[in-house]
Amino acid sequence: MRKVILAPSLLSANPLDIAGDIEKIKGQCDWLHIDVMDGHFVPNLAYGPNLVAALRSDENISLPIDVHLMVEPPECFIDLFLPLGVDYLTVQIEATPHAHRVLQRIRDSGVKCGIALNPGTPVEWVAPLLPFLDMVLVMSVNPGFGGQKFIPQVLEKAGWLYRERAVKNFNFLIEMDGGLGLENVHTAVRYGCDVIVAGNAVFGHSDPAFALKTMRDKIME
Ligand code: DX5
Ligand code: ZN
């Protein structure tokens, strides 16, 4: 079984004690997933560059930072994040007619670039971008909120990406985000996902580290 990356979403962390919640999970997780919402592309507001900067400058936190921008248009916001030392910066394909240009700018800054697809967006839309991508994020809920129900029809998108990557020798990671937990994480990995984002299943649990460990055990089953 290949290495699967667990990326808890801080959207479901305690907003009054984010550092405390990270402390609880840091031995059990691989990345930190940070959702940025603009109240326009998605009907909610969340997190911004000041949180990312604070996390990156905290010497107790050395985990890779995976930023998911749900903002429109992303070209107006990426410069706020590129200098902060983030590891992955992902933009939604539906949020710009110039996805290729945005990804190029991210890459030129030395940051790994990702493209995210809403559940209703055909996966083939990313085909021309695959050679340049470090990650494809398959949304398994409609973006905007934590704690929503998983949409199983998106699994086949991960399968398609997995096959394209193998046939054409691409290097991108396949990430899935939304409604993932103990009951479906194994299936997501079986369809080809390399990165599992989970918010509510981790921080909604009384013991978030235990939730992550159990999730990893489920993946190995
Ligand atoms: C949804 C966000 C997700 C969210 C996932 O728009 O992109 O990252 O935090 O939360 P859960 O795992 O609770 O569905
Ligand atoms: Zn996300």
Image: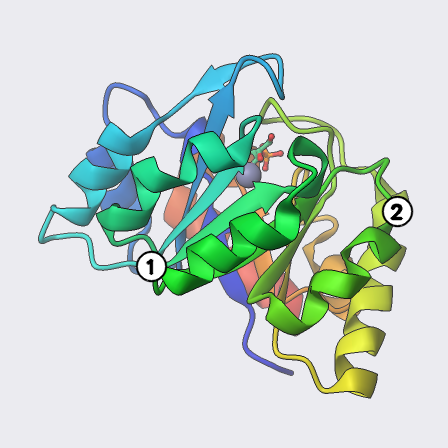
Residue at the location (75% across, 78% down)? 165
| 175 up-or-down from 116: above or below | below
Q: CA distance from mark 1 to mark 2?
A: 29 Å
Q: Is residue 140 left or right of residue 163?
A: left
> Which sits in the foreground, 187 or 79?
79
Q: Amino acid at mark 1?
A: Pro
Element type where label 1 sits in the image: loop
The residue at 33%/24% (across/down) is 14
Residue 122, disc? 2
The N terminus sits in image quarter: bottom right
Q: Position of residue 207 (x, y in %)?
A: 40, 40
**Front-most of residues 197 and 164:** 164
Task: Kindly indicate the quadrant of the structure image that contains residue 42.
Answer: top right
Labelled pair 1, 2 in contact (Cβ < 8 Å): no
The foreground one among 213 and 127 is 127
Residue 83 placement (x, y as % from top left): 25, 48
Circle 2 packing at 10 Å, graded few (<14), some (14-19), many (20+), is few
Give coordinates of residue 103: x percent, y percent.
54, 55
Going by the numbered disc 2, the residue's amino acid type is: Pro
| Residue 92: % across, % down | 63, 40
Q: Residues within 10 Å of mark 1 (few under 14, many from 20)?
A: some
| Point 42% across, 32% down: residue | 77
Answer with mark 1 or mark 2, whichever residue precedes in sequence.
1
Q: Which residue is mark 1?
A: 64
Look at the image and tell me whether residue 181 can be seen: no
Quadrant location of the C terminus in the rendered image: bottom right
Q: Name the residue at 64% across, 47% down.
A: 99
Q: Is residue 6 visible?
A: yes
Front in this rendered view, residue 122 or 25: 122
Q: Secondary structure at mark 2?
A: loop
Residue 38 falls left or right of residue 153: left
